[in-house]
Image: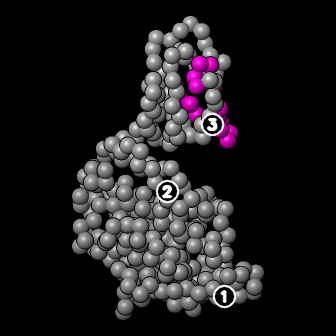
Amino acid sequence: MMFALKAVGPAISYSFSGFESGSSAPLSKVGFMKLPLPLPAQTPSSGLGGGNNARLSVVQATEESTVSFTNDRAAVMSGENLCQMATNGKATNIVWHKSSIGKHNRQELLQQKGCVIWITGLSGSGKSTLACALCQALYSRGKLTYILDGDNVRHGLNRDLSFKAEDRAENIRRIGEVAKLFADAGIICIASVISPYRRDRDACRELLPEGDFIEVFMDVPLQICEARDPKGLYKLARTGKIKGFTGIDDPYEPPLNCELVLPERGNDRASPCEMAETVISYLEEKGYLQA
């Protein structure tokens, strides 16, 4: 028989009469207990069946793992790995659970290769407009995309972040991690974000396999972006109502080695659809529009 034990609050303590003199221990993770059968009629105070001859060994179980208890042994099983715990940042005692269906399988299903198209530039440079035109053009070709727009993401996932330097860095880190998941799913992810600092963009690039991060720089001068001012933000920044606005009182660091620069030199009047076709040509050349 197998029981699931799940922590409610800081921990759950369990106690079985006849188990190591009724000792109790905290369970801070989800686990499973396999108890020997048959069970006697008498039920211990914990509400779980048990026998006087059974013994319980305590181990720490993690998410996506199973703890099986026998008379004198306890083992943590996690897929193909046994007790391979890891620490990543502040996350401890974690185990990567591998699926039998991987990125290659998903790409075969979608008949495309997952990647991240990272569109960066000043506010008003046309990032979101290009992202939508690119999404539409790829959709018409039967390709699956998803747009991570900077403002849209701040409506949900990143609504707890301000525009201070440290929060802007965290904003880009989170978007980079989500974009990585989309790419791993075989989807062409289009991230449309100002992302003013090179170090943050480079950190996102490092998350993906080489070639799967395609940086597109919207090289539009500040004067033109400010003249457009589609959201009225430049006007607010100039009057001091917005502090730390990129291009006014906070720097924008142009890419040094991006894959594409738009609009192309000598074609300053290129339409969003024309620029989208430039990106698609790059994807076709690199083999991303086929599995």
Q: Give the residue pinned by disc 2.
A: 87
Q: Give the residue pinned by disc 3.
A: 26
Q: Is residue 19 magenta?
A: yes
The residues bearing labels 2 and 3 have C-alpha atoms spaced at a distance of: 21 Å
The residues bearing labels 2 and 1 have C-alpha atoms spaced at a distance of: 39 Å
Residue neighbourhood size for the residue with mark 1, other residues' Cα within 10 Å, grouped as few (<14), some (14–19), many (≥20): few
Quadrant for the C terminus, please. bottom left
Q: At numbered mark 1, what does the secondary structure look like: helix, strand or loop? A: loop
Q: Which mark is residue 249?
A: 1
Q: Is residue 230 magenta?
A: no
Left/right of residue 2 with respect to residue 21 in the rendered view: left
Name the one closer to the observer, 14 or 182.
Answer: 14
Please determine whether, in this image, residue 210 is positioned above or below residue 114: below
Q: Amino acid at mark 3?
A: Pro
Proximity of marks 2 and 3: CB atoms separated by less than 8 Å? no
In which image quadrant can residue 233 be found?
bottom right
Residue neighbourhood size for the residue with mark 3, other residues' Cα within 10 Å, grouped as few (<14), some (14–19), many (≥20): some
The residues bearing labels 3 and 1 have C-alpha atoms spaced at a distance of: 52 Å
Q: At numbered mark 2, what does the secondary structure look like: helix, strand or loop? A: strand
Mark closer to the chain start, 2 or 3: 3
